[in-house]
Amino acid sequence: MALLADATTLLGKELRTEFRSRELLTTTVVFILVVVVLFSFTFDPSTSESRRFGPGLLWLSFLFAASLMLQPCFLREQNNDTLSALRLSVRDPFSIFLAKLSANTLFLLLTEVLMLPIFAILYNVHILSVFPQLVLVLFLGSLGVAIPGTAFSAISAQARMRELMLPLLLLPLLTPVLIASTEATGALLEVNPALRADWLGFLVGFDLVFLTALWLFGEYLLEE
Amino acid sequence: MTTPGFFPTGIRFENIDKRYGGLYALRRVSLEVRAGECVAFAGRNGSGKTTLLRIAARLVRTSAGTVKFVASASETADSGARIGFVAHATMVYDELTAEENLLLFAKLQGIAGHAARATTLLEEVGLSERRGSLVRTFSRGMRQRVAIARALLNEPSVLLLDEPATGLDPEGITWLANTLRRMRDAGRTILMSLHGESEISALATRAVRLDAGAVVADTQAGASLHSIVTFAGA
């Protein structure tokens, strides 16, 4: 219970500081918007082409935006050595990760949901009838990005060339999430939409495996 | 005199080594700090003072050796000793107010009556009128006061201070000296790193000089406190 109580307190801090500064959300929304718009200029998407390429383009832009968003996650704890203060205060170090990955998932999900209508208009696809299912896929995919992303953010924050390190470590690892999320999204945008249980199951499995690994080894990532 | 709710706690450093790659930050440091002592660590930059304090705070793992907290009735390497730590950096969030910072850390430390504790400390450090202001709007001295208030939240039995007077004006230094004096007189153990003589160094009951990661002088071995903190004869 102490773990959940501490994680909730820290999540409140993450949300408060972000909604006060709006640094991450603004940057990420603008980045995804630019990428989605630029992609739409590169070809004149008909509905059938959009169904083919749209989900991949959408998830690629989410992935690149996530690598931007995750960068400052632990980096800003270093400015005033607040990570040390957290380590001295929390009863379970995993609560630090739990709070940060929850915040990252929420921020990612929020920007993705904001971007969906723009994507639908630019790429001429219908999303209203499958909106709840799409949100489920976005949630599982975002969680799959946020869990390893938060862990690698902790590693790269202590490394040299940290701006390069995070995407280099993270993007190859997230290839399975990219494939599964793209396939699940694509199936929902078909003429006969379907919620693909196999890809959803894959995403759930990926999330559970990495969450367990983070729970087991996360403490070591916080050490100096 | 001791304050209810804490046990006088000493610290025993046994053959501490700390290496970063091939570089020794600390080399075979052995020290016994008795409960209630106020120890000033002096030494040039890079002599190992900060590393030793961070090891005592359990923020840095030793390469060899152990740190034991010795409470009145028990001895353990992973003690429930309450530690307060003031580092070079303020260890508080610029994007939160002074009060929000204290409430956050008080909640995380499971302090009962955390709101009242935060209010009391803000009054003690002279920031109650600015409790609702974001820390990023504070001067360095005011930030340091918030940092010290954060370290005192859990009424620590061991207080670790890494150059605590950093950024404080003369009035702030006097306030800090009075605060530390009260804590020392209440039986709390204080370890602090310092540069030169000041109102703060005058509080020390013992001084230790580090050089290249090793203890080279200790008032317990006959050196004078003045010579250690001023590097006289170093």
Image: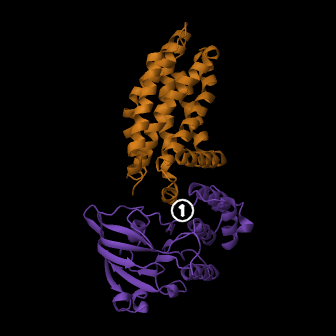
Percent position of residue A191, x then y: 55, 7
**Depth check, front residue: B99 or B143:** B99
The image position of residue A197, as x and y in percent, is: 47, 16
Residue A146 percent location from the top left of the image: 48, 37
In orange, which chain?
Answer: A
Label 1: few (<14), some or many (≥20) within 10 Å? many
**Extreme residue toward the front, this view:** B73
Res B111 seen here: yes
From this view, report whether residue A192 is shown above or below residue A94: above
Residue that mark 1 sits on = B91
Camera-side residue: B190 or A30? B190
User: Which image quadrant for residue A210?
Assistant: top left
Image quarter (top left, top right, bottom left or bottom right) of the N terminus of chain A: top right
Point 41% across, 37% down: residue:
A212
What hue does chain B carry in this figure? purple
Residue at (58, 36) in percent of width and height = A106
Image-based side of A205 in relation to A90, left or right? left
Taking B92 as reference, is B119 left or right? Answer: right
Amino acid at the residue labelled 1: Met
Q: Is residue A72 visible?
A: no
Residue B93 found in image quarter: bottom right
Which residue is located at x 59 percent, y 72 percent?
A: B4
Q: Could you tell me which quadrant the C terminus of chain A lies in? A: bottom left
Q: Residue furthest right?
A: B129
Give the structural element (helix, strand or loop) at label 1: loop
Q: How is the image coloured?
A: by chain
Q: How many marks?
A: 1
- The chain letter under disc 1 is B
Instruction: Reply above or below: A171 against B57.
Output: above
Does B38 appear above or below A87?
below
* Residue nearer the viewer, B36 or B138: B36
